[in-house]
Amino acid sequence: MMATAAGSVRIKLILTALATTFVALVVTTVAMLVYDLKSFQQGWVDDLTTQAELVATASAPAISFNDPRAAQQNLGLLRVRPQIQAGAIYTANGALFASYAQTPGEHPVFPPSPGPLGHAIEGGHMVVTHPILDAGERVGTVYLSASYRLLDRVQSYALILLGVMLGSLLLAVLVAHRLQQAITRPLLAVTDVARAVMLRRDYSLQVSERAAGEIGTLVDAFNDMLAEIARRSNALQDANRTLEHEMTVRQGAERALLLADRRKDEFLATLAHELRNPLAPIRTGLDIMRINANDPVACERARSIMERQLKQMVRLVDDLLDVSRINTGKLTIRREQVMLQDVVNDALELSRPFIAAQGHTLHVQVPEPAVYLVGDATRLAQVLSNLLHNAAKYTARGGSISLEAQACAGQLELRVRDNGIGIPAALLNEIFEMFIQADSSLERSTAGLGVGLSLARKLVELHGGSIRAESGGEGQGSTFTVMLPVLADATVATAAAQALPSDARLHRILLADDNVDFVNGIGGLLRSMGHHVHIAHDGKQALVAAEGFAPEFAFLDIGLPQLNGYDLARALKRLPALKHTVLVAVTGWGQQKDRQQAFEAGFHHHLVKPVSIDQFQEILAQSGP
């Protein structure tokens, strides 16, 4: 289509040149023809008039002397002009005096009178009438009739002009064909590039043909237009890619937010469920102890149930706090030389009671040569106990659980296997995410928040290791493998651990807490051990009592009314009688910043609620004025 258009332009340019040339030639031909005809006619008029004048001059005496023969002879001289076919001399009164015919024997018809002077064209003949004068007096008239071949003149002249016109048109075609290339070549280049751009959508193409004048301006403008379109097209494509990327990121973020929101709802529901679970037996135990206060066996059984459920609640809360500390980057681990066997023993000590309660069989295989790691023994034991606890929790009663350890090529491989419910393949990559549980149905017999594995992974990664899960599918059991770096050159510490010395001393103890039940309960236990205890329920009351009581230990809540625990500790440190008093913060705030703030206020220890009497006794045993 573009080629057809270009051909059409080429043809049109040639036709335009031909039409222009043709019109110019026609106008010129017509003008020249008209001019020639006028010149031709005027020449004939002048020639005949001259001839008539000569005859009139020669024939004037013949008329004056009435000599027709002399007049006839004068007319006979016209034979040298074959174009003059006939001639006549009339007298003054208009009578024919003498006549002449170019062809002998021909008798032309002369008008009865000469008519008006001058010239006229009559039936293809030019007639000239001229007066004969003698002494200024008109004595007659000369009449000449010549063959006026105007049509022959026109035809011959037209043939000449036609030949000139045809030659000129042919020359114009050749010239136009050569000249049109200077116009059509750049136009063809423009159309070819335009077609390529349309087919390939490639706006980087340019017209290489160069031209001068307006065509050159057109080519340059076309190239500039393509360059601008290419720039805008690239900018639009970049914008589209950016928009697509942003849409993808936004959609991913929306999906993540929806998933996080769903998991948050599931977690809150699970948290409420898991916290209510231990509260129910604790409430039942309290009812047993209240109703059967005189039955030691029932009270002991109730106490045992309550302790077990309280440990479960503390475990849930501790796991949540640890995960929160890791996610905020506030959990730090000690890096010291630890022995694998000690870590395994600590983990088994934490997990064995629960495993035994579920009726499972536990197989432990640890290398006999000592294997040393660098890390936090408590946190590593927490990882193993979480894995063992999960294995016991998600295995039907009477199942089999194994813990195997193997050191090879500078890596320690810890493997925990069970023959429990297994993990679906779709969850293997998600099982370590927060709040994900292999069994989330309402009918499940297990408990938990779904944070244990997430916590285990984060603790392992803090130690420079990795953890992975494997399972053959639902009902095929699970295997969790922990990889940790082994300490190559271990310096074995041989110093035996020494037990804390027993302290039979009795102390003066100040307890300050606005939780009346808690502080009265702890106070009663300490008094039953023989300690002298003073209880206060707000900060100002505790400060006033401390001046006269002079406690050796002060266990202070942070969120006290009237005067908070930080300000109370600073005020107690300013009292001369209490400069050796051991200050212990007892609070529900357990973040690292809370500990730091407590130590800056003057506290020596920081306990996070819930606390046991054993923690109080440990501080009383290892500290003192």
Image (cartoon, helix red, strand yellow):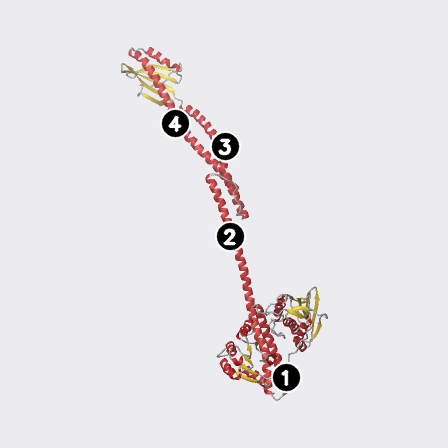
Q: Is residue 518 left or right of residue 336?
A: left
What is the distance, in whole Å, between disc 3 and disc 4 at their CAs?
A: 30 Å
Q: Which residue is labeled 4 in the image?
A: 34
Q: Which residue is labeled 1 in the image?
A: 301
Q: Secondary structure at mark 1?
A: helix
In the foreground, 294 or 263:
294
Q: Of the two numbered discs 2 and 1 on the same chain, state the one appearing first in sequence.
A: 2
Vertical position of residue 182 compared to residue 125: above or below:
below
The amino acid type found where label 1 is placed reads Arg
What is the distance, in whole Å, between disc 2 and disc 4 at their CAs?
A: 70 Å
Image coords of residue 524 (percent x, y)? 57, 85
Vertical position of residue 503 compared to residue 78: above or below:
below
In the foreground, 569 or 147:
569
Q: Which mark is residue 350?
A: none
The amino acid type found where label 4 is placed reads Val
Image coords of residue 166 (percent x, y)? 47, 29
In front of the other: label 1 or label 4? Answer: 1
Q: Dot 3: few (<14), some (14–19), or many (≥20) neighbours within 10 Å?
A: few
Image quarter in which the C terminus is found: bottom right
Q: Which residue is labeled 2 in the image?
A: 235
- Quadrant in the picture for residue 475: bottom right
The amino acid type found where label 3 is placed reads Leu
Q: Is residue 77 left or right of residue 281?
A: left
In front of the other: label 3 or label 1? Answer: 1
User: Dots 2 and 1: beta carbons under 8 Å?
Assistant: no
